Image (spheres, rainbow, N blue to C red):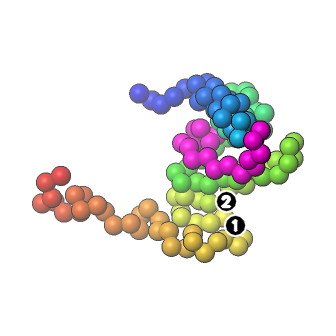
Amino acid sequence: MLGDAPRDVVRDVRLFMSTTLQNDVNEGEDTHVIIAHGAVMKALVMHWFHLYDLDSWKQINTPGNLDFYMIEGEKKEWTLSHIYDGMNAQSLLDNPPDPIAHIKRPNQMPLPPWLSDPSDPR
């Protein structure tokens, strides 16, 4: 009812990273895109950087809706960058790619017809 317990999320992320992700790495894949809920992203970052305690869970902010993070580098020399702020629809890169410019902020999007028109029966 209140979502998954942090322990369950961390367990599931560890399982994913030690099986599916590791299999892809073993096959030579070096670029991965993972789309996940904020708590899952938080657990992935914790596992990637070997932060296994509850204090780390409490200290790391849960990523917001539509936030993009990038982990790059070499083994034991990884860096984590927050590259897109989803709530403000804003690139956090110094030189953002052009396709980001067309994305509207959530508060700029029109309401769906059933919410904006009271006579709509939906």
The location of residue 40, given as percent across then percent down, is: 59, 38
Residue drawn at x 47%, y 65% as measured from the top left: 105
When the figure is inspected, residue 27 is found, relative to residue 31, above or below; the finding is: above
Judge whether residue 57 can be spotted in this image: no
Q: Which numbered dot is residue 47?
A: none
* x 51%, y 73%: residue: 102
What residue lies at 58% left-to-right and 54% top-to-bottom?
67
What's the CA distance linking mark 2 and mark 1?
Answer: 6 Å
Judge from the rendering whether residue 49 lies leftward or rightward of residue 84; answer left or right.
right
Q: Which residue is mark 2?
A: 83
Q: Amino acid at mark 1?
A: Leu
Count up the numbered dots. 2
Name the quadrant containing residue 27: top right
Rendered location of residue 30, percent (x, y): 75, 49
Residue 80 in the image: above or below residue 45: below
- Please tell me in which quadrant of the rendered image residue 98 appears: bottom right
Q: Which of 33/121 is in front?
A: 33
Q: Quadrant of the N terminus?
A: top left
Q: Are marks 2 and 1 in contact (CB under 8 Å)?
A: yes
- Which residue has dot 1 on it? 93
Magenta stretch? 25-42
Residue 116, quarter of picture: bottom left
Residue 32 in magenta?
yes
